[in-house]
């Protein structure tokens, strides 16, 4: 059986080998540590999409580089989605002038354009509402619960994901401030 | 990977459930060890409760302090059930401070208390690995080794499985007290030292390491520093008050 003195000796060897291991497994400065591919996961570049907007025209996520973006997946029949929309709208109005954009991404395949339009009008939403008519973007972002929100930094990297809701103003605003601070 | 389980209108977060189970079962190991070491079981339970609640409140308060203007305008946000507005480091430090304050006030022997908590910590570490496996977090670097797992659009080192394997190894060493510890506190330090060694080793395979100073992995640097402190404590505490032979 190992005694304490022998354990200390083993740990001392582990320390020496650990130092070599740490040097050996160092990530060279010229090798980028940021995740390369686009994937709906924290630390990865947000998968790009182009969708039609409820009010006409289209929106492309990659064209929003340089801005902090919240992509919020929702439907009009989802109670927590409805509950958090006023807070999202308020946050959008507070920060839109300093580089914050919201894309309200309606999963239209599970909803209807008319219901989405009625709800947007009822709440008075002013941010762009994108229509995912065939659920392609919902599948790309692995949305398996509503609402789901992706907070994306100015470089297009997903910084945090909030699954479920409703999100309150404090959560929304702190996340947005964090994104905006990173770019300063 | 199995992050969520839908139960009607509710979404059960499986990684959180794993941590809850880890805490619950770990607590039973702590109680058993406390009795064996002759400590008051209720006081140890209270100490854990103070640490846990202090940690949760502390995590929220520290997070809110970082965004003071936001929370001053929305004070109800402090009571949100959302776990994404918690500061892990703040919670850890304040949780330890709350538990330490309780232990000091109730005159719990410091080093013996740490020994009583050790089997619980060791079990909890296994469940942290399980939690990572369920969430897909703490993922490995891309690799082509035959045992790679396909995760996040690439074949990767199964670092979550490494984590579980090493935590299980440490638990099976710590629980039956395979390494004698004749002085209070030594078993706890042994556990921390073994965990630090495991962290330094596993971190090399991670694909999401935080990097410091010219590409060194932060967790490895911290692990090595912790290991140095452990070696010093193992030497210093060995020669102090001794356990009776039946409590080793």
Image (tube, helix red, strand yellow):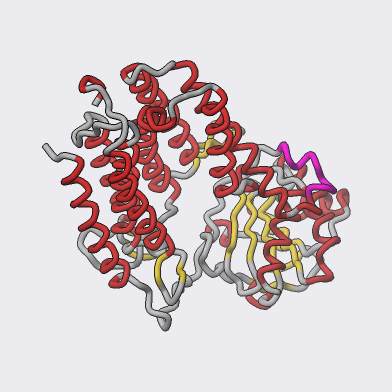
**Residue lying at 53% horizontally and 38% vertically, measured from the top left:** B96
**Residue lying at 71% horizontally and 41% vertically, measured from the top left:** A80
Q: Is residue B52 visible?
A: no
Within the image, what quadrant is residue B11 found in?
top right
Q: Is residue B75 magenta?
A: yes
> Relative to residue A120, is residue A100 depicted above or below?
below
Residue interval drawn in magenta: B71-79
Nearer the observer, B68 or B41:
B41
Q: Is residue B188 magenta?
A: no
Q: Is residue A26 left or right of residue A78?
A: left
Picture coordinates of residue A13 (x, y %)? 20, 58
Q: Is residue A17 visible?
A: yes
Picture coordinates of residue B29 (x, y %)? 35, 25
Q: Quick one: which residue is furthest to the left in this view?
A: A1
Nearer the observer, A71 or B230:
B230
**Residue lying at 76% horizontally and 73% vertically, measured from the top left:** A57
> Relative to residue A97, is residue B122 depicted above or below?
above
> Relative to residue B104, is residue A15 depicted above or below?
below
Within the image, what quadrant is residue B92 found in?
top right
Picture coordinates of residue A170 (x, y %)? 76, 49
């Amino acid at each position: 059986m190992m005694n304490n003195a022998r354990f200390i000796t083993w740990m001392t060897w582990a320390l020496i080998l650990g130092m070599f291991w740490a040097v050996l497994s160092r990530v060279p400065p010229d090798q980028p540590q940021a995740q390369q591919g686009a994937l709906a996961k924290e630390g990865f570049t947000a998968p790009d999409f182009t969708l039609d907007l409820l009010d006409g025209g289209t929106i492309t996520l990659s064209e929003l580089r340089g801005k902090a973006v919240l992509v919020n997946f929702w439907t009009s029949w989802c109670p927590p989605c409805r509950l958090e929309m006023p807070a999202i709208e308020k946050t959008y109005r507070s920060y839109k002038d300093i580089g914050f954009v919201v894309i309200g991404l309606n999963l239209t395949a599970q909803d209807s354009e008319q219901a989405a339009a009625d709800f947007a009008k009822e709440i008075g939403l002013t941010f762009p509402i994108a229509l995912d008519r065939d659920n392609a973007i919902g599948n790309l972002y692995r949305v398996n619960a509503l609402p789901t929100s992706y907070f994306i930094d100015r470089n297009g990297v997903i910084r945090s994901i909030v699954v479920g809701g409703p999100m309150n103003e404090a959560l929304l605003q702190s996340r947005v401030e964090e994104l905006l601070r990173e770019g300063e | 990977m199995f992050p969520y389980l839908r139960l009607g209108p509710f979404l059960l977060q499986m990684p959180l459930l794993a941590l809850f189970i880890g805490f619950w079962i770990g607590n039973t190991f702590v109680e058993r060890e406390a009795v064996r070491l002759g400590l008051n079981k209720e006081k140890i339970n209270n100490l854990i409760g103070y640490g846990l609640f202090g940690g949760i409140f502390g995590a929220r308060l520290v997070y809110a302090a970082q965004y003071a203007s936001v929370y001053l305008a929305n004070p109800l946000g402090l009571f949100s059930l959302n776990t994404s507005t918690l500061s892990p480091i703040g919670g850890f430090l304040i949780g330890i401070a709350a538990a330490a304050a309780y232990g000091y006030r109730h005159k719990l022997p410091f080093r013996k208390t740490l020994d009583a908590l050790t089997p619980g910590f060791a079990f909890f570490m296994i469940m942290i690995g399980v939690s990572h496996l369920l969430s897909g977090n703490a993922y490995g670097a891309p690799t082509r080794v035959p045992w790679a797992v396909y995760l996040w659009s690439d074949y990767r080192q199964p670092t979550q499985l490494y984590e579980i394997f090493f935590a299980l190894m440490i638990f099976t060493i710590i629980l039956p007290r395979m390494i004698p510890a004749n002085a209070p506190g030594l078993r706890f330090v042994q556990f921390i030292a073994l965990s630090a060694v495991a962290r330094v080793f596993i971190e090399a395979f991670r694909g999401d390491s935080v990097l410091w100073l010219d590409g060194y992995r932060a967790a490895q640097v911290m692990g090595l520093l912790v290991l140095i402190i452990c070696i010093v404590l193992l030497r210093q505490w060995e020669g102090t008050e001794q356990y009776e032979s039946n409590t080793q």
